[in-house]
Amino acid sequence: MTIEKRINEDFEYIYFFKEAFRSKLIGRPNLINTGGFNAEEVKQVKDFIKKNGEEFYTVDDDGLDKTEGYYYSKDGLDFEPLDKMTADSGHTQMFYKDKKTSEWKQL
């Protein structure tokens, strides 16, 4: 099974932060028994997310503490990365890069 097929069939969403949380993959599997990815597959998954997903960043109230990452879901970008960063670092805002204009927009 290809990486793209596994991601689309096995995960509701999957994302990673560029530097935070050791850049590990974070996601919600559709089934409880969804297997993980080996080291080579992790690289392939991250490449797939970068190419097909959304680039984003979260910030705190003053916009100084910035955490960047990439997100993929068949349904588009949602607030899961912000929820994680709100709990971990008090971030309150999330922005994504519009693929058509390359402008950053608030989610």
Image (spheres, rainbow, N blue to C red):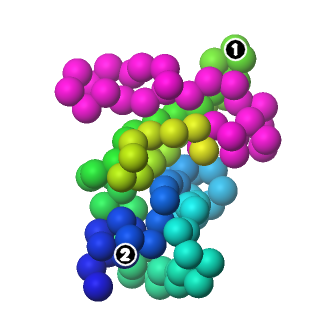
Question: Going 78% across and 43% down the picture, which residue do you hit?
Answer: 88
Question: Whole-percent x and y of residue 104?
Answer: 39, 21
Question: Going 71% across and 17% down the picture, which residue do you hit?
Answer: 61
**Left or right of 95 in this view: 80:** right
Task: Write down the region rendered in magenta.
Answer: 81-107
Q: Residue 67: name its quadrant.
A: top right
Question: Going 59% across and 84% down the picture, which residue do you hit?
Answer: 33
Amino acid type, label 2: Arg
Residue of label 1: 62
Q: Work out how far the residue at label 1 is from the one at label 2, CA to CA, in angstroms.
A: 39 Å
Q: Which mark is residue 100?
A: none
Residue of label 2: 6
Nearer to us of marks 1 and 2 is 2
Residue 67 seen by the camera: no
Which element type, helix, strand or loop, lies under badge 2? Answer: helix
> Would you place residue 13 above or below residue 58 in this image?
below
Residue 39 within the segment the image draws in magenta: no
Q: Residues within 10 Å of mark 2 (few under 14, many from 20)?
A: some
Amino acid type, label 1: Asp
Question: Whole-percent x and y of residue 97?
Answer: 36, 29
